[in-house]
Every structure is written in structure tokens, then in C-alpha cells.
Amino acid sequence: MEQHIADIGPLQLALGLIFILISGLASMAFSLKLEKDLLIGTVRTFVQLFIMGYVLRIVFAMSNMMVVIGVFAFMIFFAAWTIHGRVKDRQIRFFMPVFLSMIFSYFLVSYIVTAVVVNVKPWWEPRYFIPLGGMVIGNSMNAIAISLERLIRELKSRRAEIEMKLCLGASSREASQEILKNAMQAGMIPSINSMMAVGMVFIPGMMTGQILAGSDPLTAIKYQIVVMVMLSGSTALGTLLTVLLVRKRCFNKDEQLVLRPD
Amino acid sequence: MNNHTIIRLENIDFVYSECTTLFNNVSCDLMEGGFYVVRGPSGSGKSTLLRLLNRLENPSRGEIYFQDRSFSSIPVHELRRQILYIQQTPVVTDGSVKDNLLLPFSFKNNKNLALPDDDQLKKMLDDFSLDQVSLEKQARNLSVGQQQRLCLIRGLLLSPSMILFDEPTSALDDESSRIVELMAETLCHEKGKTIIMVSHREFVPRLVKPIIIDVREGGVCILP
């Protein structure tokens, strides 16, 4: 089934930069001030992906379970750090809850997909585990950041309502139930929407890659379906765990909201 | 007012943002059935005093006692049910007047309380001059003054022995303010509830003799 894949030479790769150049010129012409970010973004894309390519080559060649898990943990650490940077509030220490929720839920989902659904032996086979795990992390990272940001913002802005309920005998869980629901929904909606639109509105990146690499579209869609449900599952699980753990930190044992308004 | 102490503050310090001291070694007794009016310059800690009494905040040092039981030995939801806190701005939720009144009964901690029926709710509305308001009306459509009374009734359904009012009239016009103040007086005078009210309005209670709590410069002083 596999066909010969056309490799991209250095010259062709450089030609791809023409589009960035055009965007840069447009930015200058219209004073959009995007040139610097475009340049940094382009350089980072090149550098990070090249490093990744070489690292993956080494990891694939080593074929060692601990190394695979180490790479996976490092990717999650980096994602948790990115979320930490995106959510501006610093009153509550939420790095560890985010990191632990991500490790737990992503590992669980990635393991089930490689070991049970795709049935790879061994389950940590780097060629499967790392790219699939990476997609899980990259996609649900956004969802977690959105939920977390929403959770903290609403806990601050709806303080009077939370305290009203606490004063009437509610537990902190009851008092923040609706806020938790809103935060979860805000995080989940993009991945639910993409399940609705997939195949109708867009061809997902992974499937495109497989088709370009010569796979049968039917094989590609099966992988894509697995990936889509895996992404939704891991997003839901990761988001839920994160907001539950972080909410717990926003209240103390005396049912007081310790998160202060700005 | 009888001569039983309902609240005792013992050597209370309250420090916030790690360096600003609001209360420094405060000790005082509040009597059951008293009508207390809290006065003091803004930022002196009047609201914080109420929040400490309702345990929305914990003191940095010292202990508070309610009916001779230390706060830390009373389950917090039970304490908050006994010491009702009425916020400065009334907070109602989506839904009808009845939904709002029954909100406290939806919480697990209040499951053992008897659910009031429509007649009881209606009577409460009548008692608080809300006889024109139907139970089905959307609570958010009430005026601020009506919402404030709704919040008071909602809390009273939990039969508190003490009610803390945090500037309840700051968002109200004169007439509504007077109604709320009269309600507070009546609750003290007729039902024997202990009332503590922070008020920016010069108001002279007619039914009860108020006791002034003066809060300033880190201290709390009960004026004779």
C-alpha cells in the first residue's frame, strides 16, 4: 500500500518561506507590526521541528520504554508550563494540579489507544506512542487553558454569589457548581465542534499527512476517528481533573473563598 | 436584650496582605437580643468584622465564641445558618421568587430542614411588605429594594439567631432603606434576634435601643 514519498529538499523548503516573506511585506505595508513575531515564529518552527525530527530519530532507534515515557513526560511538562504562562492569575498555585491531571489522563488515553485500539506491541512502540501522545497533549492543552482561565475569572467575578450560597449553608462545591460547569463547557466546546465539522469542513492534519505519505484514505480515516475520539476523551478527562483540583485550591477547609478579587 | 453573651471575641488579630493590620488584640462581648449599630471610618474594618462573625474570614490570631462554643468547634455551615449574613448588594439567582426562597433547601447541609410550603412563603412575603409580589415572578425583575427583602426572607427561612447586615441600604432609596431598617428593628424587638448592622446612614431606631460598636484604628469599642 505504501508508496514512494516525495522528499522535500533544502531548496524547496526555503521556497516555502516565500509565503512568510509576503506576509512580512504586507505587515510592513499596513503597519501591522507583525514582522518581528512572524520572524521569531518562523525561526522557532524551523529550529523546534528540526530538533524534534532528530530527537525522534534517536528515540525510535533506541526503542526503550523509559526513554519513550521520559519524552512523553517532558512534552506534558512543557504543555503544563505553557498553560501556566497563559493563565495570568498567580494567587493559586496551579502548575502541579495541571501537570498531574495531564500526566494521568493523557497517559491513560494514549495507553488505551496504542495498547487496545491500535493494538501495537509493545504498547510504548515510539513510532505510535509519541506522535499519538503528542496530538493528545497539543490539542487538549488549549482546552485546559481555556477552562482554567474561565474558572478563575468567574470565581473572582462571581464572588458575591458564591459567598451568598456559602452563607446559606452551601458547601464550596455547591457554591461553585455552575462556574465549574461553565468552565468545563468553555474548554470542551471547541473539540466537540471539531467532531461535528470534521470531514465536512476540513480534512484533519494527521489524515492529510497520512494521505500525502501514501496511505489509503480508508486507513487514514480509521486512524483519524480513533484520534478524534481520543482527543475528545483526553480533553474531557484532563479538563475535568484540572478544574476539580484547581477549584479545591481556591477554597480552604473552612469553606472560604481564598481567591481574592483583583 | 438579656444578659447572655451570644458572641465573645478573644484577642482577635486580623492581618491581610501579610502586612496590613486591621484588628489588633480585639476582645469584646455581644449580648443576645441586642441591636448593634457598627460605626467607623471607611476602611476601618466594619465589613471585615461581620465577615469574621460569619466565618467568611478567619482571624489571624485569637478565638471567637458563639454561645460559649468556639467557632472552630462548630461545623461552618451550621454556624453560618445561625449567624445569617446579609450582603451589601442583594444577590438573587436566575429563576422565580420561589426558586430563590427555596435555594438554601437545595444544599446538602440543609436537607434535614423542613421545606416551607407556598402558604408559609406567601405569608413571609406579606410580612415584609412584598404582598404584591407573586411567587412565580422572576426574581431578577424585582427592584433592588425588593430583592434585598427577598434575600432577608431567604435567610430567615433557616431560622438564624443572629443577623448581620452589611450596609443593607447602601443601594436603596430612602423609602426602601426605611423599610429594611424597620424590618431589622422588628426582628430584634419581636423575635428577639441579635442584630448587628453596619450602616452609613444616620438612622435612629424607634423600637429598640441601639448599642454602638465603634471600629477604628485597629480596635473595636462598644460604646455605653
Image (tube, coloured by chain):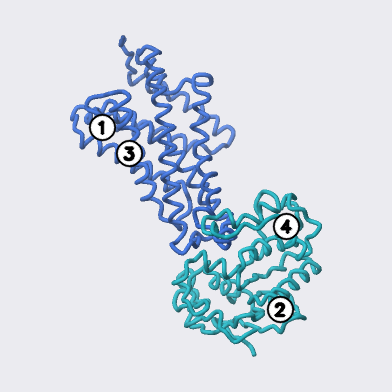
Circle 1 — which element?
A: helix
Nearest the eye: A146 or B25 = B25
Q: Nearer the viewer, mark 2 or mark 1?
A: 2
Circle 2 — which element?
A: helix
Nearest the eye: B57 or B142 = B142
Q: Colour of chain B?
A: cyan
Q: Residues within 10 Å of mark 2 (few under 14, many from 20)?
A: some
Residue A217, located in which quarter of the rendered image? top left
Could you tell which of marks 4 and 2 lies nearer the N-terminus?
A: 4
The residue indicated by pointer 3 is A75
Name the spot of residue A173 as percent of width and height, x first: 49, 53
Q: Nearer the viewer, mark 3 or mark 2?
A: 2
Name the spot of residue B13 as percent of width and height, x first: 48, 78
The residue indicated by pointer 2 is B189
CA distance for labels 1 and 3 = 12 Å
Mark 4: amino acid:
Asp
CA distance for labels 4 and 3 = 62 Å
Q: Is residue A8 above or below residue A91?
A: above
For the colour blue, the matching chain is: A
Nearest the eye: A127 or B169 = B169
Q: Chain of mark 4?
A: B
| Numbered circle sitting on residue A55 | 1
Q: Is residue A163 above or below residue B205?
A: above
Name the spot of residue B188 as percent of width and height, x first: 68, 77
**Pointers 2 and 1 within a single chain:** no
**Pointers 1 and 3 within a single chain:** yes
| Numbered circle sitting on residue B30 | none
Q: Residues within 10 Å of mark 1 (few under 14, many from 20)?
A: few
